Image (tube, grey):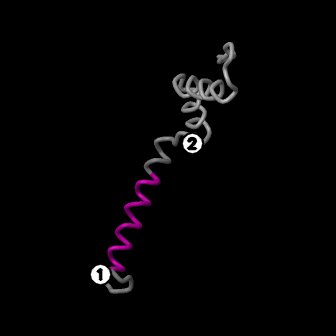
Amino acid sequence: MALEVKRKEKESPQSLVRRFTKRIQQSGILLRARKSRFKQKEQSKDQKKKTASRREEMKKKYEELKKLGKIPG
């Protein structure tokens, strides 16, 4: 998926770079590269359930400590 921009007659280097940048943005190459850069691995169903239950546990524990006055808020 090569993107090619050729210099026109009497075109300045700045306008060539500007045109190239515009083509890159319109093609969506940059967006795809940024998305794949920090792509996270999918979690299994079991792992999602574990994470959700832990989150609920921690939430209950926090509320309990808040009621006892051990956590300001």
The residue to which callout 2 is attached is 40
Q: Nearer the viewer, residue 40 or 5?
A: 5
Res 43 label: none
In the image, residue 49 lies at what x, y percent? Answer: 43, 49
Residue 22 quadrant: top right
* Label 2 secondary element: loop
* Label 1 secondary element: helix
Report how far apart the C-alphas of labels 2 and 1 lie in the structure.
37 Å
Residue 3 quadrant: top right
In the image, residue 45 lies at what x, y percent? Answer: 46, 42
Amino acid on which disc 1 is placed: Lys
Q: Establish if 27 lies above or below 47.
A: above
Indicate which label's residue lies in the foreground, 2 or 1: 2
In the image, residue 62 lies at what x, y percent? Answer: 37, 73
Q: Nearer the viewer, residue 21 or 50?
A: 21
The residue to which callout 1 is attached is 67
- Earlier residue among tags 2 and 1: 2
Q: Establish if 9 lies above or below 71.
A: above
Q: Residue furthest bottom?
A: 69
* Range drawn in magenta: 50-67
In the image, residue 66 lies at what x, y percent? Answer: 33, 79
Q: Residue furthest left?
A: 67
Residue at the spot 51% in from the left edge and 24% down from the top edge: 26
Asked if disc 2 and disc 1 are in contact, CB closer than 8 Å, the reply is no
The main secondary structure of the magenta stretch is helix
Residue 7 quadrant: top right
Q: Establish if 57 lies above or below 44.
A: below
Q: Nearer the viewer, residue 20 or 29?
A: 20
Amino acid on which disc 2 is placed: Gln
Residue at the spot 53% in from the left edge and 39% down from the top edge: 42
Residue at the spot 68% in from the left edge and 13% down from the top edge: 9
**Which quarter of the figure is the N terminus placed in?**
top right
